[in-house]
Every structure is written in structure tokens, then in C-alpha cells.
Amino acid sequence: MDDVMSVRILAAILALPLCAFAQSRAALTDPTRPPPEALQLRSPGVVPAAPSGPRKPVLQSVLVGKGHEGREVAVIDGEVVRKGQMFHGAVLEEVGANVAVLRRGNKTETLILFPLAAGGRKK
């Protein structure tokens, strides 16, 4: 009986580190795993809501030549647009250091490169 009891005690002692290792592995999460909100959007049957109304164009980059002469280019929604060219029914009227102005008829729309950092319009 002592041999059986010794074997059981030895097995229990050897099993403890394995249980602790398994439990510690369960507590670790993948740091590259997307947040739960993103995973919910990909769930079958769940369709993200379509944006309401027309989407405002996004100014992504500007390229202005020395002295604002010659090269005035804006990248809007991934498209390279030169000053005077059309972009989705609007004309690129002005390109500055961090702005681009689109004119559609008699309405103008000012796109700011870094809208949160811009305190005002800078040319």
C-alpha cells in the first residue's frame, strides 16, 4: 500500500507544474488579435451600415513647387490631381502647403491635410 500511495503522491507532484503551465497559457492573449468590435463586423450575417449621404473627399498629400509656381498637385482619395484638373465633378482651384480647394459650380470646398492640427488655413 505504501508503494501505491507513493506513486500517487509522486504523480500528483509531477502533474502540478503541468496544470500551472496549462493555466498560464490560457491567460495569454494574442497581442496582434483585432479588437472584439472588428471581429463582430466580420461575423457572417452582420453587414456594416452604409455611410449616409455623400462622403467628403480626403486630402492625403500635396506637392507644391518652389514659390508656388509650376508644380501644384494634390492627392485626393488616392488620385493625383493637378491644379485646374477635374476631380469627381469639381475643379482643383488652389493647392497650398496643407490645403486644397475644390470648386463645384459656385461652391468651394476646402480640404485640409491635417484637419485636427490646423488652427487655420495656411497657404
Image (cartoon, rainbow, N blue to C red):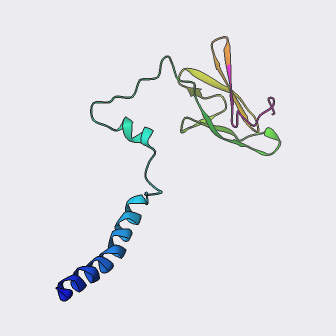
The residue drawn where x is 46% and y is 56% is: 32
Q: Tell me where residue 70 appears, x and y as whole percent.
A: 74, 40
Q: Tell me where residue 47 appears, x and y as whole percent.
A: 34, 28
The residue drawn where x is 77% and y is 34% is: 118
Q: Tell me where residue 78 appears, x and y as whole percent.
A: 53, 39
- From what the image shows, is residue 87 above or below residue 70? above
Say which quarter of the image contains residue 77.
Answer: top right
The residue drawn where x is 18% and y is 84% is: 4
Q: Tell me where residue 1 appears, x and y as whole percent.
A: 16, 85
Considering depth in this image, is 49 or 86 the residue closer to the camera? 49
- From what the image shows, is residue 108 above or below residue 44? above
Q: Is residue 112 magenta?
A: yes
- Farthest residue in the top direction? 106
Considering depth in this image, is 6 or 28 the residue closer to the camera? 6
- From what the image shows, is residue 1 above or below residue 102? below
Considering depth in this image, is 84 or 62 the residue closer to the camera? 62
Number of labelled discs?
A: 0
- From what the image shows, is residue 57 above or below residue 70? above
**Which residues fall within the magenta stretch?**
109-123
Say which quarter of the image contains residue 96.
Answer: top right
